[in-house]
Amino acid sequence: MSEKTKIIVLGAGFAGLQATKAFLKGAPDAELTLIDTNTYATMLPALPDVLSGRVPRHAVTRELSDIFPQRVRLIQDEITAMDFTAHLLTGVKETYRYDYLVVTTGSKPAFFGFAPESGSLHTLHSYPAAEALRAELGRKARAASHTAQDASHTAQDASHTTLVIVGAGYTGLEVAACANHGYAELRSGLSILVVEKADDILAFLPAKGRQKVRSYLESINVELRTGVSLEALSSTHATLSDGTTIENPVVCWTAGMQGANENIIGSYEHTRDKRLETNEYLQLPEHPNVFIAGDLAALSDGESVLRRAVNFAYYSGSRAADNCVRVMHGRKPRPFRPVDLGWVIPLGDMSLGKVFGVVPVGGKLGLRIHYFMSGFRHFGRAEAWEFIKTAVFLGRAADRPDQEAAAPQ
Ligand SMILES: Cc1cc2nc3c(=O)[nH]c(=O)nc-3n(C[C@H](O)[C@H](O)[C@H](O)COP(=O)(O)OP(=O)(O)OC[C@H]3O[C@@H](n4cnc5c(N)ncnc54)[C@H](O)[C@@H]3O)c2cc1C
């Protein structure tokens, strides 16, 4: 009896899930394996809402065994090295052999050499990271706002706290707006400061749009300092390049993302931010049985590398798997031609965006589009429904972020 063709999809994000679904249809006789560090998939655009409380936290993730109850071998492992010549993936737990591979490991934070002396440098790139930020912010902000009534807090816990967000890209600004929304009752003890190394924010927006965002931040009492970076961080204070020292900070790093680590990328062609170059069929040119999709791929519209976005990940994942099936059957693969459905930056009570790259949207309409699209792209029906409800009512869910942490998951 001949052995089944072994297909591995590495990474269970938007691209990996779409690829896996396409293989279930297109390669029903293959042995299909999906490997991820986690047992669940994460709706990454909803991570800032772990702080806003607009969506219940259980709706941010979905177990992979619920998405694929059968026919897919689900493996929880972290892949630390890939050998495309030997067709081998090395994980922390095991080594895996494949005939065909689709790699969709997404993005990771880039720290550009910055490391804290001590204390926590939070990020917002995964569900556990968002929960860790929520827990520390809640603990410190509650302590600060209860100082007067409760003498049992330690001196450090009881002082005023500042959420310092490093990087004023769309994620950093969204974190600021979501923290203001979710921790509204605790703002007397909580300042929010965004520092940005560049001289302005959101360079891709026209001046009017940038000014609108600045005015909004001012109106919600979020301080923005441009031309300023984080110089040092300890467990008690953060030092900024303008000479300021911030006592009792909670620091969230949103200053950069990169594709993959050196041991994964190897010597393959990649962009400065470590996204792998593919041919137009999403294959690694040197290894036509290896496909790259989602954030990890330097996806292009023919002129420039595309921004990291759910839609590009979603469609490139399906196209990579479709092309893999075509190659398996000796057929010519088809080029990946991205369609830009547009973008929305949701900022608490306001938003900015462009649908199909041309129709401007803002205010509550933009927010509703954002939550509706998150529901539409969700991996689970019950979770999707929570996002649709948020899109309609724009209210606050029952599990408030500013209150004592419930056990995650
Ligand atoms: C906070 C935040 C907000 C965002 N907001 C928006 C938005 O509003 N709209 C929008 O379009 N886009 C948004 N994005 C970008 C969007 O989420 C990404 O472009 C999209 O998730 C990319 O999909 P992907 O499948 O390539 O990667 P991911 O969704 O990141 O999935 C990668 C998967 O690979 C797994 N993985 C990684 N490394 C390994 C390894 N070594 N071994 C095993 N498994 C591994 C991870 O666990 C993860 O499950 C946001 C991103 C973030 C972080």
Image (cartoon, rainbow, N blue to C red):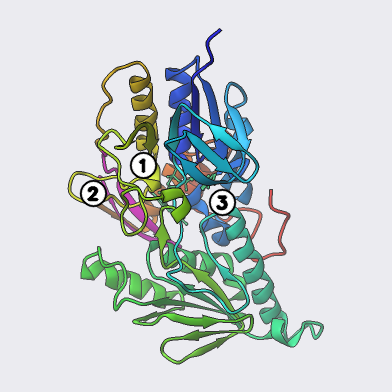
Residue at disc 1, CB closer than 8 Å to ligand 1: yes
Between marks 3 and 1, how big is the CA–CA gap?
21 Å
Write down the region rendered in magenta.
338-357
Q: Element at badge 1?
A: helix
Identify which residue is drawn at 56% across, 62% down. 51
Circle on res. 273: none
Residue 25 visible in image: yes
Q: Nearer the viewer, mark 3 or mark 1?
A: 1
Mark 1 Cα within 10 Å, few/some/many (few <14, many 20+)?
Answer: many
The residue type indicated by label 3 comes to Val
Per the model, the C-alpha gap separating discs 2 and 3 is 27 Å
Left or right: 295 in relation to 52: left
Which x, y percent locates residue 174? 44, 63
Q: Which residue is mark 2?
A: 357
Image coords of residue 321 (percent x, y): 39, 28
The residue indicated by pointer 3 is 55
Judge whether residue 350 is colored magenta: yes
